[in-house]
Image (cartoon, rainbow, N blue to C red):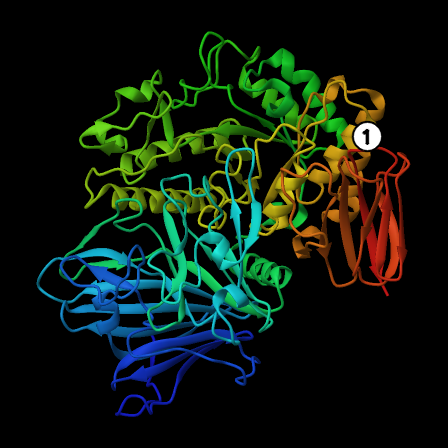
Amino acid sequence: MAFARVDANRCATGAEATALTIEAKGLRAEFEFFHENLLRLKSILPTDFPEKGFYPSVGPEYGNLVLVQVTGDGQQEHHGNKFIGGDPGLRLEYVEKHEQPAPGGRHVVIVQRDPKFQLRVESHFEINDFSAVFRCYTRIRNEGTNDVGIEYVSSATLYNFGNLTAGSPQDTLLFSYAYNSWKQEAQWKTAAPADLGWNDNAGFNLNAVVLNSIGSWSTIRYLPMGILQNPKAGVTWFWQIEHNGTWHFEISNTANGGTYLYLGGPDALHGDAWKCLKPAEIYETVPVALGCVRGGFDAAVAALTRYRRNVLLREDSFTRDCPVIFNDYMNCLRGNPTTEKELPLIDAAAKAGCDYYVIDAGWYAEASENWWDSVGAWEPSKTRFAGGLEYLVKLIQDKGMIAGLWLEPEVAGIHSSLRNKPDDWFLQRHGKRIIDNSRFLLDFRSPEVRAYMHSVVDRLTDRYGIGYLKLDYNNSAWGGDLHADSAGQGLLEHNRAVVAWLQQIRDRHPKLVVENCGSGGCRMDYAMLSQAQIQSSSDQEDYRKYPAILVGELAAVLPEQLGIWSYPLLRGNAREASFNMVSSMVGRIQQSGDLSQLQADAFQQVQSGIQIYKNTLASVIPKSIPFFPLGVPSLADRRSPIAVGLRTDKKDFLYVWRLEGEPEVLISAVNPGRARLLYPSSLGVSASLVGTNLQVSFPFPYMAAIVEVIKD
């Protein structure tokens, strides 16, 4: 990539230097120079933010654009557990700035150099024309003659977010973050700094507010994103780390009273990812998105939604048209498919209006085998399917649906034939294969592994006519040290190889749909979602808890990529079925449950919900922006109502759930217009709009509705 050189507008005497700036759509990063050629990041703010009232604390020691530490060098700060004050980062000398046009925007690079270790450090800013977001990463090249050990290096930094208005961080900041784990995804919390251990201690803190995830389940602890509000200033910063493995970010203060944010991937402390950078070798960090907007939580989610949709999403007809998927697992076959069991489900799914039919786990296991630890060979079972798998696929196609299969490509069961492959097919620690819950973990750095999994996908698509693959990931590795400087570096390389393989799968099979699943939402990140069309939202099986998960997930995943189960219970009534349908109709319907055995009124709710979804919602979901009129819900709260909206230019769609609380749900600050109850139409639910207040009435607990508001 050829870049045009852009000289910085700066003086030769340091503090009098004028600023260097980088601008995006409504976003500006400002830098200053100190001691002639030491570049410092001052702020990232909206372009129309007024200078008046801005109280920055930027000095020659702080605000370095890249926070980096190398083995054998010092740290010039009483840093405690924080990644700040590393000598190389403070010592970096400005070289030049490059810029060139890029698809949908521009690509800017700021180059610095460490004279001691002969490191060329490039800060990359990918700028798009759609949203107030910088996509950032750091690239380091060893231009010396000696190996250099990289302890940590930031992908991006931010400073002075607590200094825009007078007062301590406790007085000026609110931080929103999301716990994330199996069956309890996207549980957002908002806290002041002191609530997270960052106190005003009349000095500076030796600890930071830290969020990270270690291992190949990227979202097993938290979502890899954050939203930081300064309500007094009226602005909000937000970020997401786009990596399918270990990541880390921290927020705290510096010794001179400033505030900082570190964003990065695995490092020596978090994930055992020490890197030996050899002469002429290049090391690149994981990418992150960082932005700032006027407004609060909703404004930040809106900016991230536009960024994900226009920059990261690999759009096709599946994400554009939102067809409906049936999957036979949840509250249904649960990994025990047979021809006899599938036949009535195929008929019922087609009758309900589904477009895809996915046979989940177990299709490869013989009747005498455990589907869990027999994964790996991916050959259809000879004892489950009378007439063979081909017969079922043909029947699915004859019913007007596209057939899909469950696949877990990154593992091999201890009873699979793949166990006899060479050891270098598998992730290893200290010379031994990693075994997790009766499975080996395949190492996608191996060309043989990638070729094998390509052959599996080619066979399933070309021979059997499979058009949808649900790619699951139910195990997690903390690292792999074979052919790597450290276990964390081995895992980083494997993680990147998985994403590259996914990209190749999409290129080889353009019509194939790929679902990203990790025991539900345990690997829900935009490294994976830049290649997969749809994300599994959760394995949560209590439909009453599901709204408190999916609403929070809309801050993390595009609605057209968020697959949401609808699993009406076998003996459930129409109210229960409609509650399920409202939840799934927020994003992508993943229908399940034994539809062939549902009561007639429950099946009618499924059928009418899918029809309304196709006629009204499917075309607007890929253009909509989520908003949160009642805030982000909690699984622990069974009484308060839940609501989320999808906003378009001409209409808002409000999804409302009554739990155990009052029958009347009031939502204020709705755009004035005309309200229409879209679904359900026959269960006694009513909705009315008075001015800017929407009132939805439910005759029974645990009911839900979708209201269309046509704007005046």
Residue 436: image x %, image y %?
35, 26
Of 618 and 566, the residue lying toward us: 566
Q: Is residue 566 above or below residue 629?
A: above
Using the rendered view, name the quadrant where residue 700 is placed. Answer: top right
Using the rendered view, name the quadrant where residue 255 is placed. Answer: bottom left
Horizontal relation, residue 692 to residue 536: left or right? right
Q: What residue is drawn where x is 85% and y is 46%?
A: 696
Residue 415: image x %, image y %?
35, 15
- Please give the count of numbered marks on the rendered protein: 1
Q: Residues within 10 Å of mark 1 (few under 14, many from 20)?
A: many
SS under mark 1: helix
Kindly give the residue lying farthest to the front in the view shown: 202
Horizontal relation, residue 588 to residue 202: left or right? right
Q: Is residue 178 above or below residue 461?
A: below
Regarding residue 317, the answer to whether it shows in the image is no
Disc 1 residue type (three-letter):
Arg
> Label 1: which residue?
575
Kindly give the residue lying farthest to the top in the view shown: 368
Check the picture and name the quadrant holding the N terminus: bottom left
Residue 591: image x %, image y %?
67, 31
Horizontal relation, residue 322 to residue 450: left or right? right
